[in-house]
Image: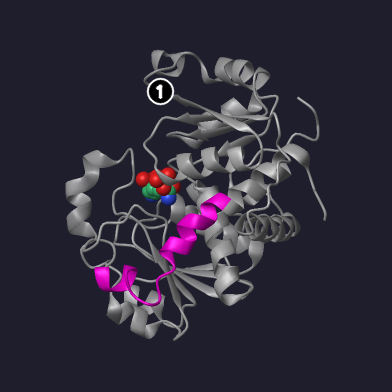
Amino acid sequence: MTSSLKHYLQFKDFSREEYDHVFQRAKWIKDKFKRYEPYHPLFDRTLVMIFEKASTRTRLSFEAGVHQLGGSAIYLNTRDSQLGRGEPVEDAGQVISRMSDLVMIRTFEQDIVERFAANSRVPVINGLTNEYHPCQILADIFTFIEHRGSIQGKTVAWIGDSNNMCNTWLQAAEVLDFNVHVSTPPGYEVEPERAGLFGTNHFEQFADPMDACRGADLVTTDVWTSMGFEAENEARMKAFADWCVDADMMSVAHKDAVFMHCLPAHRGEEVTAEVIDGPQSVVWDEAENRLHAQKALMEYLVLGRIEN
Ligand code: CP
Ligand code: NVA
C-alpha cells in the first residue's frame, strides 16, 4: 500500500476542500458529456464492482461511468464468486486489488469495506453499507448545488428512518457546514456513534416531522425498511405510518425547498405521489447525477487532482 492511496468509505473521508474540487470536476465532466465530447482519462483502467445487495442505479452509474471515462467494469456478486462461500474479505482485497485499478463494494456491515480496503492496493469506494451511502449524498449535494447554489448554512430535513442515508447526511453536514433536522419515530432515533459523528452542533432531532420540515431548504426521505432489515418490515410499516412526506410537510418548508429521494421509492409509504412527482421534486436529476458525480470521484481517486 502506498501512502497516497485514498479510499472513499465514509463521507468524512474527504475534506471540504476536496469536495469543492470533486463538485467542480463533476460539473466539468457532466458538461463535456452533454456536448458528446469524449473524455477518457481512465483509458485501460479496470473497475471491479462487488455487489452483496441488489442495485439498479449504483451498478448502472458505475458501469456506464467507467466506460465513458475510457475504462471497463467487472461485476462480481456474492452468489457467483467465492465471497459467498466464505473466502475471507482480507484475501479478496489482496487478490482483487492486484488485478484492478479501483474497487466499488456494496455490502452489509461497514466493517467489511473497511477490512477490504485495509488489504487493497487500489482505491476502494463504498457503494452502500448498512451504515453509510456516501456516493448517494455526493450526488445529492451536487444536485442541490446545481439547483440552489452552495449548501453551506442551509437546512436539510430528514424524515423517516435513521439509516445509512441519514447517517451520511449527518456526516456531510459536519464536513460542509449545514444543518440537518431529523425526525424519526420513537425507537428509531439517530445513534451518533453509528453515524460516525465528530460533533453534534449540525443536527437537531424533532418528535414531529412537521417541525423538522419547517423552513427547510431540502426535504428528503428514504424507504422505511432498508436492504438487510426485511425481517423488521411489518413492525416498521406500523411505526413509520406518520412519517410520510406529504404536501403539508412541503408547505411548511422554505417556498423554494426541493424534495429528494435516493430511490427506489414506495409511493404512499415514505412519500406521497403528489410530492415525489410534484414540482419541487428533483429526484430524476438526483438519480442522473450519480453518474456525473461518481465519474468525478473515480477520476480523483485514480488520478488525483486534475485541473483544466
Ligand atoms: N439509490 C441507489 O443506490 O439505488 P440502487 O439501490 O438502485 O443502486
Ligand atoms: N436505505 C436504503 C437505500 C437504498 C439505495 C437501503 O439501504 O436499502
Please state the horizontal and vertical placement of residue 229, each as a whole percent of the image.
30, 41
Report the predominant secondary structure element of the magenta stretch.
helix
- Up/down of 117 relative to 213, above or below: above
User: Which residue: 52% across, 33% down?
Assistant: 105
Q: Tell me the amino acid under the disc marked 1.
A: Thr
Answer whether residue 191 is visible to the viewer in this image.
no
Residue 190 lies left or right of residue 151; in this view the side is: left
SS at circle 1: loop
The residue at 45%/34% (across/down) is: 109
Of residue 28 and residue 217, the one placed in the foreground of this image is 28
- The count of marks equals 1
Quadrant occupied by the C terminus? bottom right
- 123 drawn magenta: no
Look at the image and tell me whether residue 186 can be seen.
yes
The x, y position of residue 33, in whole percent, is 63, 54
For the rendered model, the colour scheme is one colour
Residue 85 at x, y percent in the picture: 40, 13
Residues in magenta? 273-291
Q: Residue at x 55, y 73 (%)?
A: 147
Magenta stretch encompasses residue 277: yes
Q: Does label 1 point to a residue whose CB lies under 8 Å from ligand 1?
A: no
Camera-nearest residue between 64 and 57:
64
Q: Is residue 236 above or below residue 206?
A: above
Determine the image quadrant of residue 241.
bottom left
Q: Is residue 101 left or right of residue 128?
A: right
Find the residue positioned furthest to the front. 36
Disc 1 target residue = 78
Residue 27 falls in image quadrant: bottom right
* Residue 80 relative to residue 7: left or right: left
